[in-house]
Amino acid sequence: MQIRPATVADLPALTALYAHLIPEEAPCDLTIAEASLTQLMTWAGSAILVADDGARLLASCTLVVIPNLTRGGKPYGLIENVVTHPDARRTGLGRRILHAAAEQAWAAGCYKVMLLTGADRPDNHAFYKASGFEQSKTGFQMRRHPKRP
């Protein structure tokens, strides 16, 4: 199993993997996905990491390294879109890809790595805790909603 940064060639398989993350959402158009991945790759230290068994992508997470003006100018990492294919769950692969993202963040000089989960399931929270994350802050978000007629 190889954990590596995603490439444009991975996008069809990656968008298929995301169907296990948000089943009710249509896959991202590949032209838009390519533009987004290309832009993400310009951010130092940032990547979409994938776990590749040689035949298919089995897990992924996105790491964004964000420049910062506090903490001595050290950046911080944000992990998003954590997904493991159902066939590979409970094998340690999800933990391995999160640790790979954290190692990449440390290599980029980050002082912390954080993630939010929208899943309100105890097993998801236990997974993140077992992977070395601690539940220590309160998250808030604002979403842009389409205008209603």
Image (cartoon, rainbow, N blue to C red):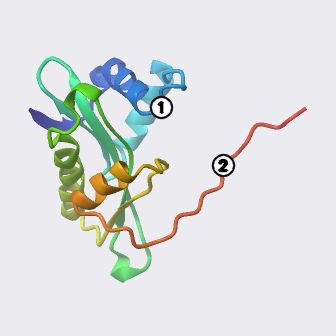
The N terminus is located in which quarter?
top left
- The amino acid beneath tag 1 is Ile
Q: Determine crowd level at label 2: few under 14, some 14-19, many 20+ residues with C-alpha closer than 10 A.
A: few
When asked about the image quadrant of residue 38, the answer is top left
Q: Nearer the viewer, residue 15 or 87?
A: 87
Q: Name the residue located 73 percent from the left edge and 42 percent from the top edge.
A: 145
Instruction: Identify the residue shown where x is 48% and y is 20%.
Output: 31
Q: Looking at numbered disc 2 in the image, what kind of residue is underneath it?
A: Arg
For residue 112, side relative to residue 103 (left or right): right
Residue at (39% x, 34% y) in the render: 37
Relative to 76, does residue 98 appear above or below in the rendering? above
Around disc 1, counting alpha carbons within 10 Å, would you say few (fewer than 14), some (14 to 19), or many (20 or more)? Answer: few
Name the secondary structure under disc 1: loop
Above or below for 115 versus 59: below
Of residue 100 and residue 34, the one placed in the foreground of this image is: 100
Q: Earlier in the sequence, mark 1 or mark 2?
A: 1
Identify the mark at residue 22; answer none if there is no mark. 1
Work out how far the residue at label 1 is from the one at label 2, CA to CA, in angstroms.
16 Å
Answer yes or no: is residue 133 visible.
Answer: yes
Tell me where residue 15 appears, x and y as whole percent.
39, 24
Q: Examine the rendering and report whether any part of residue 45 can be seen.
A: no
Image location (x, y in percent) of residue 68: 42, 71
The residue labelled by disc 2 is: 143
**Residue positioned 44% across, 56% down in the render:** 116
| Callout 2: SS | loop
Q: Nearer the viewer, mark 1 or mark 2?
A: 1
- The answer to whether 146 is drawn above or below residue 28 in the figure is below
